[in-house]
Amino acid sequence: MSDVTRILDRVQQGDSNAAEELLPLVYDELRNLAARRRAGEAAGHTLQPTALVHEVWLRLVRTPDQTWQNRAHFFRTAAECMRRILIDHARRKQQVRRQSSILVSSRAGRRSAIAPPGRNHFPSPLAQEFPPRPRRE
């Protein structure tokens, strides 16, 4: 029985110090797992491996009635949790993209699909101070 499995048993028995002892033992492996998981994601992903490990750790530790049979079961659970976090993160990003392309009309209350505003859509302070000159024909 490995040290990790013994500490996992203590966590399940309610030992509050066991979780603090467990993190240093599993952190590097969780970090490597997160880096591998994140490598399969699309370029430009904003969730870093370290943040992913921290989020997984919080979810695993805060889950009531969580039981792990052994070290391998713990890491399989962590990998599944990472997968779910990455999926949730991608869904939130996609939702923001979709919402930015829909503007709600304040008069009619209807939605219309419009491309998100371009760079020059919102006037800058200089544009307000120096309005554009009319074109010469």
Image: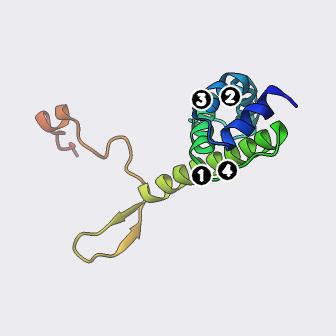
- The answer to whether residue 132 is seen in the rendering is yes
Secondary element at tag 3: helix
Front one among 133 and 17: 17
- Compute the Cα span from label 1 to label 3: 16 Å
Name the residue: 57% across, 54% down: 91
**Residue at label 1?**
64
* Rendered location of residue 133, percent (x, y): 17, 39
Name the residue: 47% across, 53% down: 96
Q: Are marks 4 and 1 in contact (CB under 8 Å)?
A: yes
Earlier sequence position, callout 3 versus callout 2: 3
Earlier sequence position, callout 1 versus callout 3: 3
**Residue at label 2?**
22
Label number found at residue 9: none
The amino acid pointed to by label 3 is: Asn
Q: In the picture, which quadrant includes the N terminus?
A: top right
The amino acid pointed to by label 4 is: Gln
How crowded pointer 1 is (Cα within 10 Å; few <14, some 14-19, many 20+) is rated as few
How crowded pointer 2 is (Cα within 10 Å; few <14, some 14-19, many 20+) is rated as some
- Compute the Cα span from label 1 to label 2: 17 Å
Is residue 47 rendered to the left or right of residue 43?
A: left
Name the residue: 60% across, 27% down: 20
